[in-house]
């Protein structure tokens, strides 16, 4: 059972980041009646894939990914979607203070009880890491007694070695259709993976079933906070 929250703020850099890792959780919160805001920092216009078969070009991809994001939001039931307008693959070069303030502004506006993003140091992609650092810097400025909880997605190879097992595991079996639909919405980027995933689900392959049965998070450890 996913615990009730006052308001959930989800922050990721790219369209489809939410679909892979947290779309079941997002859908579950929304179905509970929990207000949820998703801030997507870029349009993923530098995504490596152009569809299978190819249907996008470098010029058309930004608009295609915008429409895919809207479709994914609809699949999950998101009504408060923020497209923040940053440029894909450049977030690591944005001013740290401006990034922190952007996150703080969102927090001050929607007043979430929970923030979901990536775990700094364990998110692999430079845009993921820059987003995670901005979230931590923003949350750190909030008085501890008023600070929202931070549930973080971590998937680097050394995650379990250094962080242990995830301490938050959400069952998403009841919303696996919505999760798959969110992933399908981002078809320019997900076509290759979906072929194997959907075949694996039909065959009840354990690795494939993990994608549509649970989503895992880490509670951020403020005592070990090392973001500078």
Image (cartoon, rainbow, N blue to C red):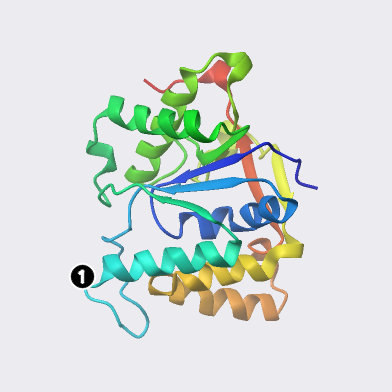
Q: Is residue 53 left or right of residue 8?
A: left
Q: Position of residue 223 (x, y in %)?
A: 57, 16
In the image, what residue occupies the spot 65% across and 47% down? Answer: 216
Q: Position of residue 47 (x, y in %)?
A: 31, 63
**In this figure, which residue is indicated by the disc labeled 1?**
58
- Compared with residue 143, is residue 26 higher up or lower down, i.e. above or below? below
Of residues 181 and 126, the one drawn nearer to the viewer in this rendering: 181
Which residue is farthest right? 1
* Quarter of the C terminus within the rendering: top left
- Compared with residue 193, is residue 93 higher up or lower down, i.e. above or below? above
In the image, what residue occupies the spot 28% across and 47% down? Answer: 86
Q: Position of residue 63 (x, y in %)?
A: 29, 68
Corner quadrant of residue 137: top left
- Compared with residue 150, is residue 36 higher up or lower down, i.e. above or below? below
Corner quadrant of residue 202: bottom right
In the image, what residue occupies the spot 24% across and 36% down? Answer: 94
Q: Which element type, helix, strand or loop, lies under badge 1? A: loop
Q: Is residue 198 visible?
A: yes
Which residue is farthest bottom? 53
Q: Is residue 208 visible?
A: no
Task: Please give the count of numbered marks on the rendered protein.
Answer: 1
In the image, what residue occupies the spot 72% across and 58% down? Answer: 172
For disc 1, the neighbor class at 10 Å (few under 14, some 14 to 19, many from 20) is: few
Q: Position of residue 166 (x, y in %)?
A: 66, 40
Q: Is residue 172 left or right of residue 50?
A: right
Of residues 48 and 162, the one drawn nearer to the viewer in this rendering: 48
């Amino acid at each position: 059972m996913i615990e009730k929250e006052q308001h959930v703020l989800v922050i990721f850099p790219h369209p489809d980041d939410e679909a892979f890792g947290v779309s079941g959780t997002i859908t579950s919160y929304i179905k509970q009646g929990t207000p949820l805001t998703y801030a997507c920092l870029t349009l993923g216009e530098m995504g490596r894939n152009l569809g299978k078969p190819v249907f996008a070009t470098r010029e058309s991809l930004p608009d295609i990914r915008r429409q895919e994001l809207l479709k994914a939001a609809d699949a999950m039931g998101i009504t408060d979607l923020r497209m923040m307008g940053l440029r894909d693959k450049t977030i690591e070069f944005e001013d740290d203070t401006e990034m922190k303030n952007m996150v703080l502004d969102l927090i001050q506006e929607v007043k979430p009880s929970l923030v979901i993003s990536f775990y700094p140091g364990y998110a692999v992609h430079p845009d993921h890491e820059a987003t995670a650092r901005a979230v931590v810097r923003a949350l750190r400025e909030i008085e501890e007694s008023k600070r929202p909880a931070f549930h973080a997605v971590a998937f680097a190879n050394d995650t379990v070695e250094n962080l242990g097992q995830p301490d938050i595991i959400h069952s998403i079996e009841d919303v696996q259709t919505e999760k798959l639909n969110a992933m399908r919405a981002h078809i320019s980027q997900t076509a290759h993976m979906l072929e194997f995933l959907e075949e694996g689900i039909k065959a009840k392959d354990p690795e494939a079933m993990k994608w549509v049965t649970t989503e895992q998070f880490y509670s951020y450890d403020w005592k070990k906070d090392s973001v500078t």
